[in-house]
Each structure stands twice: as structure tokens, then as C-alpha cells.
Image (cartoon, rainbow, N blue to C red):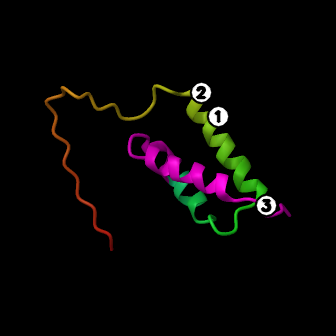
Amino acid sequence: MDSHLDDPSSYRRLIGKLLYLTNTRPDLCFSVNLLSQFMQSSTNYHYRVVQHILRYIKSKPSEGLIFAADSPIHLKAFSDSD
């Protein structure tokens, strides 16, 4: 069994940054959401999975949604917090 992280603050910061990144990288949503459920009791295994996701992002930098500033497309969204 993997041990709990001595200092989970770096794990929490990475998850927060990855959650922000999911706005333009929908391919990460499921994995990051799943990992965010372990913020209070993260283990070395969870941290290794986050590192794996970071390597995936680095290997595919052109993936994701690109929104140009001068694009005629107007993005509208609705979110129900329920």
C-alpha cells in the first residue's frame, strides 16, 4: 500500500492548475476530476498519476481547444451547480 504524502500542498496546487487547464483540455476532465477526490488523503500513487498526466500534456502541447482573440465565434455556456 502506498503511503500518504508528507506534504500534500504540492499535490493540491498541481490539481488546482490541472482543473483550470481542463477548460481548454477536455481530454483531461475525467482523470483530473477523479484525482481531485483525493485532495485530503493523497498518496504517493496519486502523485505519480499526476506526474503521468503532466508528461502526457508535455507530449501533446497542440491538443485542446484554441480560442483566438479575433475569432468571430462567440462562446456561450451554462453551468448548473446542482
Secondary element type, mark 2:
helix
Please rate how many residues cluster around mark 1, counting C-alpha atoms within 10 Å: few if below 14, some from 14 to 19, many from 20.
Answer: few
* Residue designated by label 2: 59
* C-alpha gap between disc 1 and disc 2: 6 Å
Q: Nearer the viewer, residue 5 or 73?
A: 5
* Residue designated by label 3: 6
Q: How many marks?
A: 3
Left or right of 4: which side holds 76?
Answer: left
Q: Position of residue 64 (x, y in %)?
A: 42, 34
Q: Nearer the viewer, residue 7 or 34?
A: 7
Query: Which amino acid type is marked by label 3?
Result: Asp
Query: Which amino acid type is marked by label 1?
Result: Arg
* Residue designated by label 1: 55
Q: Residue at x 65, y 47 (%)?
A: 50
Query: Which amino acid type is marked by label 2?
Result: Ser
Please rate how many residues cluster around mark 2, counting C-alpha atoms within 10 Å: few if below 14, some from 14 to 19, many from 20.
Answer: few
Q: Residue at x 48, y 51 (%)?
A: 19
Secondary element type, mark 1:
helix
Q: Which residues are magenta?
A: 1-29
Q: Quadrant of the rendered structure where residue 80 is? A: bottom left
Asked if the magenta segment contains residue 4, the reply would be yes
Q: Nearer the viewer, mark 2 or mark 3?
A: 3
Left or right of 51: which side holds 28?
Answer: left
* C-alpha gap between disc 2 and disc 3: 29 Å
Tell me the quadrant of the picture where the N terminus can be found.
bottom right
**Furthest residue in direction right, as rendered:** 1
Secondary element type, mark 3:
loop
Does the residue at mark 2 contact the one at mark 3 (Cβ under 8 Å)?
no
